[in-house]
Image (cartoon, grey):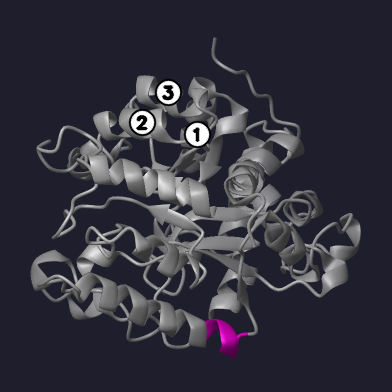
Amino acid sequence: MSRVLKSHYPNFSRREFLTTAVGAGGAMLLGPAWLSAADGVDPRVAQVVSGTIGIDMHNHVYPAGTEPHPQHGQPRRQEEQQQAPSLFLAEEIKRSGLTAVCAAYVLDFAPNDKPGDARDNFLSWLTAIDAQLEKEHMHRALNLKDLQAAHDPLKHAQPIIVQTVEGAQFIEGRLERVEEVYKRGVRHLQLLHQQDDLVSPLGDVITSPAHLGGLTVFGAKVVQECNRLGILVDLAHASPETILEALKVATQPLIVSHTGLDTRTGGNPRMAEMMKPHLISKERAKVVAGAGGVIGVWTKLAGSPKEFVENIKAMVDVVGIDHVGIGTDTDLLSSRVGQGTNKAWPALTGGFFYWVVGEMLLQGFTPDEIGKVGGGNFCRVFGQATAGHA
């Protein structure tokens, strides 16, 4: 049965509700000061945002000069390649209203022409992130307590990142490399993207014909090693067979950080056809949720915050409120409309999460439900995966 949601604030138009200019004094401040200090935010939105550990389960973070090129070594167009040098990680997270982003590097978009290249590229990017974090007095979240501390106003909270990578081609059949990057702060590992590991593939992906029989034997070992170390496993881009096999060997809940329901394809037929392989069926979504996992809904195929929240509602109707999160698949440090997190839609004039929370309230989500989708569900599985580890 579809979940019925009724708006708690029917007397406000969408634009009035999302852009009411008020002071911060009207909100009960639960989180860091920056979450309640955004100009022009309705106090009801500010109150929910300040009480939520807002987390983007999948975001690309490229300090200027570290942007990977697309696969096959083809250079990006000039307007696609340039990150905005004036944008800073902490400032953009604060502006968004989020507490943390899962910061990913699309590893198979880098020039990995021979064995060893992927590892070198990933380690170089981690070093660039080290420098960015040091410059902005930020840290990586190594466990749930770190995420909670980043949201605690009594601890002079500063935004934080969860270190991840999109595609684990750096492993190259060397299981010890999982622990190598764990020691560099990686706590979230997306096994697959588009290209196979050059040495020892981990499993079939959704955008290429299946040829590995789902999760490989070595891929299963990587899942188990992540569980042993305390790394959250992400099955985005994995084929249905790969997901089923990973769930069989995993000892901790898994996530699919960024996708959408295959019944929600938006209003652009060309984009819908392009994105179709990336979408998840209701049946597969239920399997992930049934194992305790969380599915992040992305901003693709949503032309506005309204459509994005409608896509979230559709996912909630399928798997339940405890198994849905937000995974934008955007680039935090990009200023391009449609690509940058705070530029996810042309009409977006403020921080991303403020708009999403406002729209969720308008569409009838309660503050507790927003807290779960906005980051609480991710915190639960992240806490389970990292429990007992430093």
The label shown at residue 177 is none
Secondary structure, magenta segment, majority class: helix
Q: Nearer the viewer, residue 304 or 170?
A: 170
Q: Residue at x 81, y 75 (%)?
A: 156
Q: CA distance from mark 1 to mark 2?
A: 9 Å
Which region shows up in magenta? Answer: 132-136
Q: Observer-nearest residue: 88 or 383?
A: 383
Q: Look at the image and tell me in which quarter the C terminus lies.
A: bottom right
Give the residue number, with chain letter if any, for mark 2.
264
Residue 287 image label:
3
Q: Residue at x 60, y 77 (%)?
A: 90
From this view, report whether residue 269 is shown above or below residue 32: above
Asked if the stretch drawn in magenta spans residue 56, the answer is no
| Three-letter amino acid code of the residue under disc 3 | Val
Please give the name of the residue rendered at 25% of the width and 35% of the height, measured from the top-left corner: 239
- Front tag of 3 and 2: 3
| Horizontal side of residue 326 vs 209, given as left or right | right
Q: Is residue 320 above or below residue 30?
A: above
For label 2, count other residues whose C-alpha is less than 10 Å away and answer few (under 14), some (14-19) or many (20+).
some
